[in-house]
Structures are given as structure tokens and as C-alpha cells.
Amino acid sequence: MKQYAVIGLGRFGSSVARTLSDLGHEVLAIDIDEERVQQVEGFVTHAVQADATDESAMMSLGIRNVDVAIVSIGENLEASILATLILKDLGVRYVACKATSELHGKVLERVGADRVVYPERDMGVRVAHNLVSSSLIDYIELSPDYSIAEIVARPEFAGKTLRELNLRAKYDYAINIIAIRSGDAVRISPRADDKIHENDILVVMGSNEAIKKLQP
Ligand code: ATP
């Protein structure tokens, strides 16, 4: 069990806090707004009203002892940057921050953020991919050229084994099927003689080009 601090309890922060709690971790949730604090009280270990830009307040909360702190203040750039700086100065080992723009992210990295996430931008990319292709269910970018995608299998794949389809060779070895989902059942690392059924969902990892070609 690890100790986490979540600072800023908007939609993103409270979702992170709730998930960490559900996963069995200790969570210290902090917000400057008392109402936001009350909203998470029921599901985190400690919920405290405090200003994350007040170094002595952060110190007295014992924040330096947490394993990971998540700064999820988006709108107020100054508060987000100062809070990150203070957490690193106080010695928090790993600080992850939510950024609302590339520039905001760059500044957070400069003041010591160990990880910067861009939830709005990343979700926008995923939703756009899903809108463009109705067969593409989800999409995670690994690098500018490679991704993991969930794709509805082409109708002509039904009844064929992976060996028969020979997709890797067909797509210049730029694609790998890492799982096949049939309803609620998932076959992880499928074998060559695993068969694809109608409406199966393929979880594939590969080049963006190959993933695009694989969609019906
Ligand atoms: P989300 O998109 O995640 O819902 P939001 O738009 O509701 O975020 P943000 O401006 O990103 O709100 O701020 C998230 C939370 O951070 C708010 O609940 C706000 O009260 C809190 N917050 C802002 N400044 C501070 C601060 N100095 N110390 C602690 N919490 C703060």
C-alpha cells in the first residue's frame, strides 16, 4: 500500500483520488475549497482544506512523507506551478501534474514535475479517433508513430484463425494482436490457432498506418 496526496479536487482530481482509494491506497486529499473537500471525505483516508501554495501549511500536513503527489489544479496556473515547486522543495519523491496546455506542461517540468499529464488533450485525441472510425473503440498513443487500439474485427476475419489471417506478415510486421475480446471473455496473448468470431474486438499494438489499414 502506497501513500498518495491529491491536490485540487475538481473532476479530474476527485476521480484520481477515488480510484486510488478503490485500489486500496492511502489518500490525502487537499483543496482550498471546503465544499470540494467535503465531497470526497467519504471515500479517502484524509480530506483537508488547505492552500497548496502555502509551504508551511503543506509541511504541517506531513506531505513530504507521501510516495506520490498529484497536482490536479488546472485553471489557476500560478497555484499549479507554485504547488509543484513547493512539493519538490519539501522532498516529495514523485510529483505528477495535470497541465492544461503545452506551455503549462513545460513550466511544470522546469519546476521539477516528474510527470505531466494532459487529460483534456489526450481524451480529445481518443474521442476524435473514435468519431472518425466507428470500428475503432479505443486508442492509446504510445509514440507519434505507434499506438494500441481496440478495433472491431473485419467481417471477413470471422471463422479464421490468426495463422490463417497471417496479419503480421500482411502488414509488414508492423502489427501485433495482443488480445481478442469476445463479449465478456478476453484472450490475452492469443495463439496462432485462436479463431476470430463475428463482432470480436481485437486489441492491437502497431504502427498507426497498419492500425488504419486494419479497420474495416
Ligand atoms: P477539472 O477539470 O478537473 O474539473 P476544475 O476546472 O474543476 O478541474 P481547476 O481550476 O482545474 O478546476 O481546479 C481544480 C481544483 O483545484 C478546484 O477544486 C480548486 O478549488 C482547487 N485549487 C485551486 N487552487 C488551489 C490551491 N491553491 N490549493 C488547493 N487547491 C486549489
Image: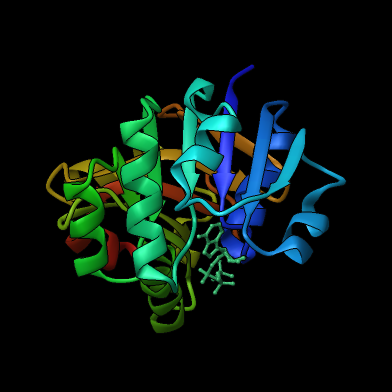
Residue lying at 40% horizontally and 75% vertically, measured from the top left: 124
Q: Is residue 9 left or right of residue 147?
A: right
Tell me if residue 57 can be seen. Answer: yes
Which quadrant is the N terminus positioned in?
top right
Residue furthest to the right in view is 42
Q: Residue furthest left?
A: 172
Please indicate, yes or no, whether residue 204 appears anywhere in the rendered image.
Answer: no
Residue at the image point whose x is 16% and y is 58% from the top: 144
For the C terminus, which image quadrant?
Answer: bottom left
- Residue that appears at 62% across and 51% down: 50
Q: Nearer the viewer, residue 37 or 122?
A: 37
Q: Residue furthest bottom?
A: 132
Q: How is the image coloured?
A: rainbow
- Compared with 26, 48 (above or below) is below
Indicate whether 54 appears above or below 186: below
Indicate which quadrant contains ligand 1. bottom right
Residue 40 image offset from top left, x and y in percent: 78, 52
Q: Position of residue 177 (x, y in %)?
A: 38, 41
Instruction: Give coordinates of residue 33: x percent, y percent.
Output: 68, 64
Q: Nearer the viewer, residue 92 or 72?
A: 92
Residue 118 position (above or below residue 185): below
Q: Is residue 128 left or right of residue 138?
A: left
Q: What residue is at 57 percent from the left and 57 percent from the top?
A: 8
**Where 190 falls versus 34 (above or below)?**
above
Residue found farthest to the top? 1
Query: Where in the figure is residue 105, as x and y percent of width and height?
Result: 25, 59
Total count of labels? 0
Q: Is residue 155 left or right of residue 96?
A: right
